[in-house]
Image: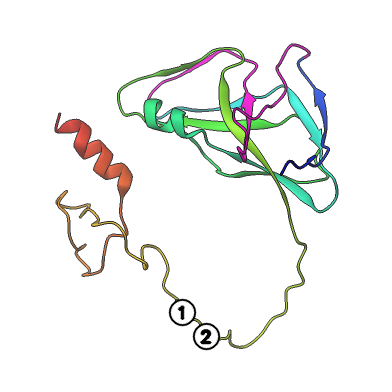
Amino acid sequence: MSRAGLEVLIRRVDPDVPLPAYAQPGDAGADLRTTVERELAPGERAVLPTGVSVALPEGYAAFVHPRSGLAARCGVALVNAPGTIDAGYRGEIKVIVVNLDPRESVRFERFDRIAQLVVQQVERVRFRQVAELPGSARAEGGFGSTGGHAGLDPASGTSGQVAEGGPTGGNRYASVVSDREGQ
């Protein structure tokens, strides 16, 4: 079944930039491109312009998500992922990128795809203060409480428990760095 989709007004700040586009049918995110050339040294971050601004309908927001290929191949992440574009914002969409690769610089060329824009309907809620929250199966279990990763002891670099005796919660970045150093 095909859906017509929500109409979002868009303005090119840079007249030559390609409009955001979905790479494949069914994709949730439309690719955003940068309008500048920029090289990032290891650990460096930058604010990259996309050359577009949007007018979202009331009750919607757009979220700027990282591109998994940039993360996997180059170690590029977004500092505030996802970035939130509110319905009332009319300025140019900009993306804060960081190079997490410990050794290699990454270079962006004009019109490289740097992020994905996901538009979603959002609810405006009323907050009601209470003395106690109702119970749930998860209760106050937070970071790493549902398991799924053996973890890495930050002090020794080994799998297992942290010094305090709790699970590490899965420091995946440290695991990737350890894997690279072992090669």
Residue 158 seen in the current view: yes
Residue 147 included in the magenta stretch of the image: no
Secondary element at image label 2 = loop
Q: Which residue is mark 2?
A: 135
Quadrant containing the C terminus is top left
CA separation in Å, label 1 and label 2: 6 Å
Question: Image quarter for residue 101?
Answer: top left
Q: Nearer the viewer, residue 66 or 36?
A: 66
Residue 64: image x %, image y %?
62, 39
Residue 93: image x %, image y %?
70, 31
- In the image, residue 177 sits, relative to residue 40, either above or below, namely below
Residue 28 included in the magenta stretch of the image: yes
- In the image, residue 36 sits, relative to residue 167, either above or below, namely above
Q: Nearer the viewer, residue 181 or 120?
A: 120
Tell me the amino acid under the disc marked 2.
Answer: Gly
Q: Residue at x 55, y 43 (%)?
A: 81
Asked whether the beta carbons under mark 1 and mark 2 sit within 8 Å of each other, the answer is yes
Q: Residue at x 20, y 36 (%)?
A: 179
Question: Image quarter for residue 74?
Answer: top left
Image mark for residue 139: 1
Tell me the amino acid under the disc marked 1.
Answer: Ala
- In the image, residue 113 sits, relative to residue 96, either above or below, namely above
Q: Which residues are magenta?
A: 15-42
